Image: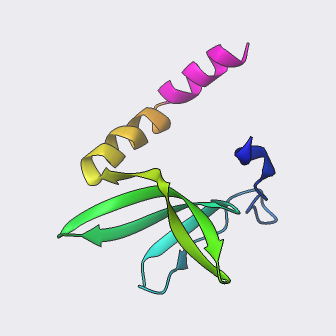
Amino acid sequence: SEDEEDDDAEGENGKADKVQRNEDGEAYFDFSKNKRCTVRKWRDMVLVDIREFYEKNGEKKPGKKGISLTLDQYKSLREIIMDGSLDEQIKALEK
């Protein structure tokens, strides 16, 4: 799958590289070579954008595959991650 082909964007401590900035000054975090999470503002809304990127003429461009979460949606996702609910379901499927 494409996920397996992506190069890891992990630093020495095993965590994803820290915050970076794109040409618009938006904060982003690379998950892998072609996947990133960007925090941006659009129409006065803060969005957490998780998206695939591709390279064209040496420049990274956002692809169609991805999702933009509103702040409330992000907080809901964050809650199920922080309380361990998501990990429980993942572990159940890995058995």
Q: Residue at x 71, y 46 (%)?
A: 3
Q: Quadrant of residue 90?
A: top right
Q: Residue at x 18, y 69 (%)?
A: 43
Count of numbered tags: 0
Q: Residue 35: where, in percent of width, then height? A: 61, 58
Q: Main secondary structure of the magenta part?
A: helix
Residue at x 63%, y 14% (from the top left corner): 92
Placement of 59 over or under 90, stated as above or below: below
In the rendered image, residue 89 lying in the magenta stretch gets the answer yes
Q: Say which of 4 and 17 sits in front.
A: 4
Determine which quarter of the picture holds residue 9: bottom right
Residue at (46, 32) in percent of width and height: 83
Q: Position of residue 36 (x, y in %)?
A: 56, 61
Could you tell me residue 13's position as x and y percent? 78, 61
Q: Is residue 83 one of those drawn in magenta?
A: no
User: Going by the picture, which residue comes out furthest to the front?
Assistant: 57
User: In the image, 48: left or right of 56?
Assistant: left
Q: Is residue 31 above or below residue 43?
A: above
Left or right, 26 with reference to 33? left
Query: Where 73 falls versus 16 (above or below)?
Result: above
Answer left or right for 92 relative to 45.
Answer: right
* Colouring rule applied to residues: rainbow
Q: Residue furthest left?
A: 44
Q: Quadrant of residue 78?
A: top left
Q: Position of residue 25 (x, y in %)?
A: 42, 84
The N terminus lies in quadrant: top right
Q: Quadrant of the C terminus?
A: top right
Magenta-colored span: 84-95
